[in-house]
Image: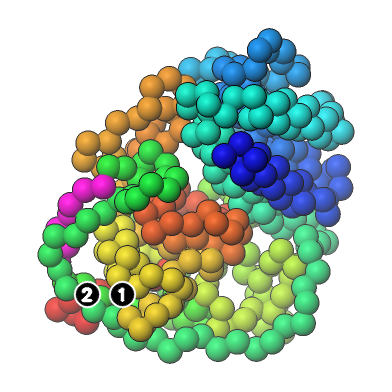
Amino acid sequence: MTAALYDRFRRVRAETLALAAPLSEEDCCVQSMTDASPVKWHLAHTSWFFETFILERFERPFHAFQPAFRMLFNSYYNGVGDKHPRPQRGMITRPGLAEVLAYRRNVDERMAMVIGEGAASSGLGELVELGLQHEQQHQELVLTDLKHLLSMNPLKPAYAQRGAVHATLAPEHRWIGFDGGVVHIGHAGDGFCFDNELPRHRQFVEPYALSSRLVTNAEYLAFIEDGGYRNPAVWLAEGWDWVRNGGNGESGGSGAIEAPLYWHRAESGWQEFTLHGMQALEPDRPATHLSFYEADAFARWAGARLPTEAEWEHAAASCPGDIDPCGIAQLFGVSWQWTSSSYSPYPGFTAPRGAIGEYNGKFMCNQYVLRGSSIATPAGHTRISYRNFFPAYARWQFSGIRLARSAWKA
């Protein structure tokens, strides 16, 4: 138990450093918008989590690396105390990256001692696993936040070089039907889950059909060329205002929204900014970096709708793996998929006591659920019951579209 837990701890922590390794100190310090955080902040905050919720409880005697870090790298845990304003994380030029990396090393050394000495301690293993799952969430945020930062640079630099590119064809599109009835939703089994995946409960769904794959760039381009961004009939009222007002500042420009976040119209055709720099738009790749507003508008334009999260989970549970004889592809590892479900508690949900209970429950307001996972999601960090959530305007995440239809329209 102790050796396996420490090995996992060491491995996850190393993976975070590997993501930051290609970056300069300047890359790690800048904040490109309020919704994103500097890489340096992610490196510090994930260490803060272990120091605050584990070392303060289990280390004897406890000695903070730097007492001021308790406030500086607190994200949203009001029960812990004061926190630095989120929009100003890019102003934290000190401590420098070297001191943040020293903080990580210090926390790692102390965690090794606590894990080694406290294997039998009540709740230690569960808290360490929560901290590692939390760190994996921030590994994904490192990539999404960094991509947004690099996209704002006029040089459009690449985070990583891309290998040989081979033409890919989108899987054939089909509608896959599912019977309605009472289904079971939520985490099952003994493995890890976040509190918002519980409790497992029954839910009724009408017969429905899901698209066998995600919406492609070519299909989304057809929506654009058909005047989709100029047609208020396919937009929610709030979404139409968002389009006309230029979104929430993710693009750094002004004027109405006309395309997905990282698309650019050039003389040679459409291009897309990627982690590998600016690339020609690949028609058969799934369309990503779409807001809920855009996903909903496209679905309405296409004569379909977005699935509910219960429909998505029921279908995924019926089709284990990325694709099998039931015919549904791209469930995981491509892009998060918007659902029409508001992020709210399951029947019987209870948040854990103390500050750790602020992890998910207090955000169950004015957000929508996304299901699946993306190309930025760490390996092993996916589950059928995983509930991601963002506000309707968010599109700097790798978020895409899977269409649904009610069975009588399939």
Assess whether residue 203 is covered by the magenta stretch: yes
Q: Quadrant of the C terminus?
A: bottom left
Q: Give the residue pinned by disc 2.
A: 178
| Colouring chosen for the image of the structure | rainbow
Q: Is residue 196 left or right of residue 111?
A: left
Q: Quadrant of the N terminus?
A: top right
Q: Where is residue 124 in the image (x, y as percent from the top left)?
A: 53, 28
| Count of numbered labels shown in the rendering | 2
Position of residue 76 relative to residue 391, above or below, is: above
Residues tagged 2 and 1 counted as in contact (Cβ below 8 A): yes
**Residue depicted at x 77% and y 82%:** 164
Amino acid type at circle 1 is: Leu
Q: Give the residue pinned by disc 1.
A: 210
Comparing 61 with 27, the one in front is 61
Position of residue 78 relative to residue 196, above or below, is: above
Q: Where is residue 290 in the image (x, y as percent from the top left)?
A: 50, 62
Residue interval drawn in magenta: 200-206
Q: In this view, does 92 lie to the left or right of 218?
A: right
Q: In this view, does 123 lie to the left or right of 189?
A: right
Label 1 environment density (alpha carbons within 10 Å; few <14, some 14–19, many ≥20) = many
Position of residue 4 relative to residue 284, above or below, is: above
Question: Nearer the observer, disc 2 or disc 1?
Answer: 2
